[in-house]
Amino acid sequence: MNGPRKLYVKSFGCQMNVYDSRRMADTLAPRGYVETAVADNADLIILNTCHIREKAAEKVYSELGRIRRMKETAQAEGRRLVVAVAGCVAQAEGKEIIRRAPAVDLVFGPQSYHRLPDLLARAERDGKAVDTEFPVDDKFDHLAAPSQAVIRARGVCAFVTVQEGCDKFCTFCVVPYTRGAEISRPVSKILAEVEHLAAAGVREISLIGQNVNAYHGEGPDGQPWSMARLLERIARMNGIDRLRYTTSHPRDMDDDLIAAHRDLPKVMPHLHLPVQSGSDRVLAAMNRRHTRADYLDVVARLRAARGDLALTSDFIVGFPGETESDFAATLSLIDEIGYAGAFSFKYSARPGTPGADMENQVAEEVKSERLHRLQASIDRSQAAFNRRCLGRTFEVLFERPGRHDGQIVGRSPYLQLVQVEAPASLIGETADVTITDIARNSLFGTLAHAPVREPAQLGAGA
Ligand code: SF4
């Protein structure tokens, strides 16, 4: 081999995809691939796609149009550029991608990442390769672990996948079709990965999964462990100071998990809890399996357990049949909860989902107008939450240099970005910061005192 080959991975969508992209790079590293931030000089381009956002497939095809021209340039220069499409669009579209975009050499779904080296060899040998099977083996077992140097370069916060897929079948969502049935990873595998990350200096772990709080992986005792039990076990590990988990379904917030927010100081006081709509009629049509009252009850119990809990959520406007009064119920829910932030989208039909076949689709202009009002309401709620942080002092975990010299950036316990004038030597450390100013998407603060890492701050000892 003549030196390392360059790999460019572009991730679309959620944190699961960012994590998966990293694991693809880790799987290819032993085969001589190094990551590059520039697509133009790559030998292998992987688009790791997401099917959740509007017009996802069309965005991928337009990106592939640009990549086709890069491939032609590479060919003219006597280089081979291999183009791969991964993720949920790959899973949903399969061979159709190669038919519509002949520049693509390889299409593979989320269950095939560990077979990437073999698939590449197949594409190089046979010209094209497609793998969108749901295999029975556990892909997590076969994914390569990143080296300690790679983990250190990625910073002090890391994602760990603990479950994948979903059995809920919300009528707007493709996940149960593209990622398959819910699978939880065994506890021992998760602990080994967290230990490996902690040894490289990772301080904050986000446990991720499409329906993460439905976690029920096999514990060392052979019994299924809940998310609460998993958090409690990881909280006892040395080196890890902060724990988060995302994305949760309201129905799976059980009493033990709510109590974990009260009892485990390392579990950060922030929860992303999608609700999608504030109207019972729409929630039923979405097959969310919970009502507005159920959601409010979960929130009340969470806040009783942890008074300062920040909540964020996801909303869909213009789901088929949504009336103005359904939409008003969503706006009133936002006021009632007081979110620290939220993602909001116009409903867009995903082929193959029940929502796509519903007859009472909402007109595009109505959806746009409602989205505008919804976002204004979320912005007001977020601004009010941020204003309540003014003058408060809390611990910030610094992750990277800021945009200006002498500035560093970290995350508050509530996941807000916090910018502070402080020495770069604090990156990777936590320090108490007093919030002195707020902007739309970040807070500004000053160090309250020098950073301290007393053993007592690490929570329950191992
Ligand atoms: S719970 Fe989440 S991942 Fe599962 S079907 Fe509903 S929206 Fe999709």
Image (cartoon, rainbow, N blue to C red):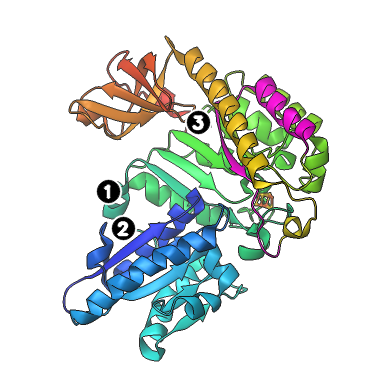
Q: Is residue 151 above or below residue 317?
A: below
Percent across and percent down for residue 368 are 61, 40
Q: Amino acid at mark 3?
A: Lys
Q: Is residue 324 magenta?
A: yes
**Figure quadrant of residue 454:** top left
Q: Amino acid at mark 1?
A: Ala
Q: Which segment did they paint magenta?
A: 323-352
| Foreground pick, 172 / 133 | 172
Q: Is residue 387 above or below residue 453?
A: above
Query: Which-is-in-front pick, marks 3 and 1?
Result: 1
Q: CA distance from mark 3 to mark 1?
A: 24 Å
Residue identified by numbered label 1: 153
Q: Is residue 181 magenta?
A: no
| Foreground pick, 125 / 316 | 316
Q: Is residue 45 visible?
A: no
Residue identified by numbered label 2: 147
On whether ligand 1 comes within 8 Å of the CB at mark 1, the answer is no
Percent across and percent down for residue 117 are 39, 76
Q: Is residue 365 visible?
A: yes
Circle on res. 266: 3
